[in-house]
Image (tube, rainbow, N blue to C red):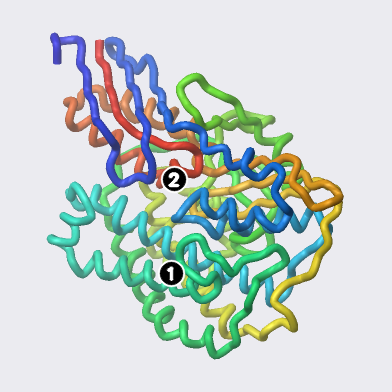
C-alpha cells in the first residue's frame, strides 16, 4: 500500500485452475473501474492445424487440446464430421459414446471438487495440505476419479487422449464381460458420489447471485454427447445455427475470444446451465440427491456449482451402470462412411459446458476450414462481470481477503484455460 487510497495486490499465478494468465482489477475510490481477465498465452492454432488434414483425423488431433476433457473434443469432432458426411451414429454405438462421456464427467468433476475447489471451503492452501488434514476425503475423491478413468481406459484405450475413438464409432468395441468388470467399482463410486453431494452441500457459500442467461444442450436425456442448444429465456436453435446465435469477439486483453448471444448479451454455460434447463432429466438418485442438497429450480450462485457438479457425478455413475446393464454389442464397431463435400456441425456437453465444432470438408475428404468454440472462452465475459460485482460488494475487505475472494470465485467456474488459451496472475490496483 503506497498511501491510504491506493492499493496494489499482485498474485504471480492463481493456484488450482488449469492454465496461466493474469487478472487486473482497478478500483477508483468506492467503485470498481475496470476488470480484465488478461489471457496472454499464445494462441494454440488447432483450427489452423486441422486445415489440410483428412476427415478421419480431427478426433485424434483435437483430443490434444485438453488432457482433462479429451473425450469432449473427440466426440464433438466426430459429430461434426459425421454431420458433414450425412451419417448418424445411433443405438449401442451411441450408448458406448455416452458411457465414455460418463467416465470423463466422473473423473473431471471429481478432480475439480476434491483437488481444486474444496480446499477453499476447508481453509487449505492446496490439495496436499487437504490430504494431510482430511485424508479420507481426498482418498474418496481419488477413488471417484479412478472409477471415471477406468471407463475411459476400457473404451478409449487409455485415460488421457484416448486412441480407440474414430469417426463412426470405435476401432474396437468391448464385449459385455469387459464392461461388467467395471460394475463393482462403479457401485462403490455411486455411494462415494452420494456422500460427496451430502458433504459439499454443507459448505458455507459466499453470497453471490448472477443474472446471466444460461445456455445448455437439451433433449430427451440429460445432455452429454448430443442435444439442441437452448437458453433459459426460451431461445432454441439447431447446432447448425450455433455460429449465427453465438457471436465471438476479440478483446484487447485476451488471446481467447469472448462470446455473447446474438439476441442478448453475456451468458454462462456449464453445470449451472445444464441443471437449470435439464434437472427433470437427471437419474432418479441424482434427483433425490439434488433435492436433499437444497437444489430446486435454478441455482444462480456460482460458488454452489460444486454441489451441482457432485449431483452430476451421481447421474453419470448411475447412467454408466444403466448402459452397462443394457449393453448388447453392435454387429460392427463403427458406422462406415464416405467423405463428401459439405459442412458439418457438432456440439456436446463438456464438463465445463457446451463445446462446438464446425468443419468444412471437400469432396476428397480434406478439411478446408475448422472452428472450435470451447466453454471456458464462452464464459469469460460472465466471469468478468461476476468478479466486478463480487469486488464492488467487498471493497471493505483488506488486500489479502479480497485477493482470496477473487481467487475462490474464479475457481468456482472450473476454468480449463488450455482449451480457451491460458490464465492467471492477479493484480488489484486501488486509487
Q: Position of residue 130 (x, y in %)?
A: 19, 57
Seen at 61% across and 66% down, the residue is 165
Residue to which mark 1 is pinned: 149
Seen at 63% across and 59% down, the residue is 75
277 lies above or below 15 = below
Residue to which mark 2 is pinned: 416
Q: Is residue 255 left or right of residue 30?
A: right
Structural crowding at the residue carrying mark 1, measured as other residues with C-alpha within 10 Å and reported as few (<14), some (14–19) or many (≥20) = many
Q: Quadrant of the N terminus?
A: top left
Structural crowding at the residue carrying mark 2, measured as other residues with C-alpha within 10 Å and reported as few (<14), some (14–19) or many (≥20) = many
Seen at 74% across and 46% down, the residue is 367
Q: Is residue 397 left or right of residue 232?
A: left
Q: Which image quadrant is residue 31 in?
A: top left
Residue 427 vs residue 314, the one in the foreground: 427
Q: Mark 1 or mark 2, which has the lower sequence index? A: 1
Q: Residue at the far bottom: name it.
A: 177
Q: Position of residue 123 (x, y in %)?
A: 17, 48
368 lies above or below 317 = above
Amino acid at each position: 500500500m503506497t498511501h491510504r487510497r491506493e492499493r496494489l495486490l499482485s498474485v504471480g499465478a492463481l493456484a488450482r485452475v488449469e492454465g496461466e494468465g493474469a487478472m487486473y482489477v482497478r478500483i477508483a475510490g468506492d467503485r470498481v473501474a475496470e476488470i480484465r481477465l488478461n489471457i496472454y498465452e499464445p494462441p494454440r492454432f488447432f483450427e489452423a492445424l486441422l486445415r489440410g488434414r483428412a476427415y478421419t483425423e480431427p478426433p485424434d488431433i483435437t483430443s490434444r487440446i485438453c488432457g482433462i476433457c479429451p473425450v469432449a473434443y473427440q466426440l464433438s469432432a466426430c459429430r461434426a464430421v459425421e454431420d458433414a458426411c450425412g451419417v448418424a451414429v445411433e443405438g449401442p454405438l451411441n450408448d458406448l459414446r455416452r458411457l465414455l462421456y460418463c467416465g470423463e464427467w466422473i473423473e473431471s468433476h471429481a478432480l475439480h471438487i476434491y483437488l481444486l475447489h474444496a480446499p477453499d471451503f476447508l481453509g487449505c492452501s492446496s490439495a496436499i495440505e487437504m490430504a494431510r488434514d482430511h485424508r479420507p476425503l481426498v482418498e474418496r475423491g481419488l477413488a471417484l476419479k479412478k472409477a471415471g478413468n477406468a471407463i475411459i481406459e476400457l473404451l478409449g484405450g487409455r485415460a488421457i487422449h484416448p486412441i480407440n475413438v474414430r469417426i463412426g464409432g470405435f476401432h474396437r468395441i468391448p464385449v459385455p464381460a469387459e464392461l461388467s468388470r467395471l460394475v463393482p467399482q462403479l457401485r462403490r463410486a455411486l455411494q462415494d458420489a452420494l456422500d460427496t453431494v451430502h458433504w459439499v452441500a454443507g459448505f458455507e457459500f459466499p453470497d453471490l447471485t448472477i443474472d446471466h442467461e444460461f445456455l445448455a444442450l437439451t433433449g430427451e436425456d440429460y445432455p452429454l454427447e448430443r442435444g439442441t442448444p437452448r437458453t433459459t429465456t426460451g431461445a432454441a436453435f439447431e447446432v447448425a445455427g450455433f455460429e449465427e446465435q453465438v457471436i465471438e469477439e476479440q478483446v484487447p486483453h485476451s488471446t481467447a475470444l469472448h462470446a455473447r448471444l446474438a439476441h442478448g448479451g453475456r451468458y454462462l454455460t456449464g453445470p449451472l446451465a445444464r441443471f437449470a434447463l435439464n434437472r427433470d432429466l437427471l437419474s432418479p438418485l441424482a434427483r433425490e440427491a439434488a433435492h436433499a442438497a437444497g437444489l430446486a429450480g435454478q441455482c444462480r450462485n456460482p460458488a454452489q456449482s460444486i454441489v451441482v457438479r457432485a449431483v452430476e457425478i451421481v447421474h453419470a455413475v448411475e447412467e454408466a451402470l444403466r448402459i452397462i446393464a443394457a449393453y448388447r454389442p453392435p454387429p460392427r464397431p463403427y458406422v462406415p462412411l464416405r467423405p463428401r463435400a459439405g459442412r458439418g456441425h457438432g456440439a456436446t456437453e463438456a464438463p465445463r459446458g457446451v463445446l462446438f465444432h464446425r468443419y468444412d470438408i471437400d469432396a476428397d475428404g480434406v478439411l478446408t476450414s475448422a472452428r472450435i468454440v470451447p466453454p471456458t472462452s464462452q464464459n469469460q465475459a460472465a466471469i468478468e462481470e461476476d468478479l466486478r460485482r463480487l469486488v464492488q460488494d467487498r471493497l471493505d475487505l483488506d488486500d489479502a481477503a479480497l485477493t482470496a475472494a477473487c481467487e475462490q470465485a474464479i475457481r468456482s467456474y472450473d476454468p480449463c484455460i488450455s482449451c480457451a488459451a491460458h490464465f492467471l496472475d492477479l493484480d488489484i490496483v486501488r486509487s
